[in-house]
Image: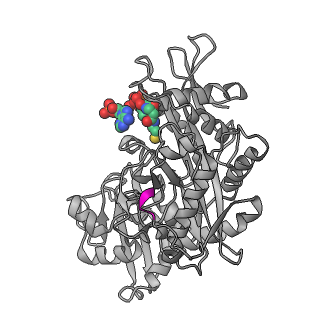
Amino acid sequence: MLEKDLSDGLILRWATPDDLQKVPDLVVEVFSTPDMQVDSLGERFRKIMVGEGGLMTSDDCLVVVDTKKEGDPVIACTSYWQEMQTYEGIPFNAGRPAWVGVRNAPEYRGKRIMNHIMDALHARSKDDGTMVQVIHGINWYYRQFGYEYGVDYGKRSKVWLSSVPRLEKGSVERLRYRRATVDDIPTMLEFDKAQGRGGAVHIPLSEAWIKGQIEDMHRQDTNKTHVVGKYVLMFEDESDNVVGFCVVPGFGDEKDRTLIGIYQIGFAPHIDIPTVLFSAMRNVIAFAKSAVDEERFQQLTSLGWHVSRWHPVVEAIPSHLRNFAKIPYEDPSYYYRVSDLSTFIQHILPALNLRLKSSLTHKNFTGSVKVSMYTPRHPGFELQIESGVIVNTLPYVKRDQSEDPTVAYFPPFVFLQVLFGRKSIAELEEIFPDVEMEESTEKLLSVIFPKKVSIIHHYM
Ligand SMILES: CC(C)(COP(=O)(O)OP(=O)(O)OC[C@H]1O[C@@H](n2cnc3c(N)ncnc32)[C@H](O)[C@@H]1OP(=O)(O)O)[C@@H](O)C(=O)NCCC(=O)NCCS
């Protein structure tokens, strides 16, 4: 069991049941601002920590405790989640640091205490056999641990409640909401799956996570004072068929007083989204009205779309109603970390081969292409291709300065933007002079690693 002396009385270790109250307390302290104590975060974190949502157990949290102080307070923490993502349909497990924080005191901040936590977390993730780590978090910070932006959320949107068209007189509302039950989960997973098509990466709705949210929501049925984390709603059509779902965060968040948030939303594949869009909006507003008292409802002014900019439901909002806006808890992008590129590329090879085979230009290509990160500290990879099939992938390090037209150069980590579809190689060449390769190499690599929009949801 990890127990590392960081000197000066600080000990790094995995959390124990005794820390179950200390860590949420630290989370509240760290994520509050001087002008706002965000107590609801403690309860939100506690639920996740005890395993609701299936992201972690209370053991999966790294803490640094200060043994110089009475009661050994936790002064830094990061929880370790595991999630499954897919690359063009191929599943891969990802380890995720979450709720990263150091107590805001001069004796702890700015001392790189987090480096020890991140090292331990990456070692654990490697032991668990995960090839990738992900996080959506504060800007720049995670780059120092080998993360790079891979999938964007894009700008978020708001729709003013007052701008949502009313139901026309004499018309019947197309949708009706009801609270989900665990029996709805398979249907929701199907609707969610359909939205993953076309992107490089999909983060499937997790069965354990949605189950946790539904069970939490229903605690309010027997305990009216229970503070719900997320409401999970189903949409039914006029014939009582389930045709969609959506996840709305609870209304107790201190930072988020004016928004009715939409964290997840999806419809059955046969549904025409523009046709049901306003009905869905009206239903969510009606639900909010039923969930809070009149005073709280009056504070709500807009629907806040936390899902990615390219989500089909958000894209369906007419431009005169859609306001691009900053909203609380938004992060611009998902960071990815892949310490062994050639092993991960081997894992997703069927997807890369499909791209190559469907290319009109390179479907019969034979040869080799190498990707160098300039330094042996960050090995690249080589793809050996025969008649349009990548038959082998190997680690590659270019050790000399000789010219080789089959080598593409990327500064360390920047290639991850191409791997996960965030940017095209041509876009990166415009920005970085040291992303460089022969035109023929660029054309081949752009077929294998095209720019692709991936639709992601918010679920913190
Ligand atoms: C973010 C946080 C964990 C950093 O810990 P810290 O002890 O303050 O900073 P560190 O000693 O680890 O700093 C290492 C480097 O990161 C930089 N850094 C620190 N905080 C940063 C931030 N919020 N954003 C970007 N860079 C940051 C430091 O300037 C330092 O850079 P340098 O190498 O050029 O000197 C801590 O400030 C914190 O808990 N913040 C509030 C909670 C939070 O925002 N967590 C992240 C949620 S995703």
Q: Determine whether 87 is above or below 18 in the image.
A: below
Which residue sits at x=67%, y=76%? 238
Pinpoint residue 375: horizontal percent, then vertical percent: 33, 51
The answer to whether residue 181 is left or right of residue 82 is right
The answer to whether residue 283 is left or right of residue 428 is right
The N terminus lies in quadrant: top right
Tell me which image quadrant ligand 1 sits in.
Answer: top left
**56 and 11: which is toward the camera:** 56
Q: Determine whether 259 is above or below 416 in the image.
A: above
**Residue 105 occupies quadrant:** top left
The answer to whether residue 222 is left or right of residue 339 is right
**336 and 275: which is toward the camera:** 275
Please say whether residue 93 is visible from this viewpoint: no
Q: Main secondary structure of the magenta part?
A: helix
Q: Which residues are magenta?
A: 160-164
Please say whether residue 280 is visible from this viewpoint: yes
Pinpoint residue 181: horizontal percent, then vertical percent: 75, 59
Which residue sits at x=38%, y=25%? 110
- The stretch drawn in magenta includes residue 260: no
Which residue sits at x=52%, y=70%? 167
Pinpoint residue 36: horizontal percent, then vertical percent: 45, 29
Pinpoint residue 254: horizontal percent, then vertical percent: 51, 36
Q: Return the residue found at the far right.
A: 222
Total residue callouts: 0
Which residue sits at x=77%, y=63%? 183
**49 and 97: which is toward the camera:** 49
The answer to whether residue 446 is left or right of residue 51 is left
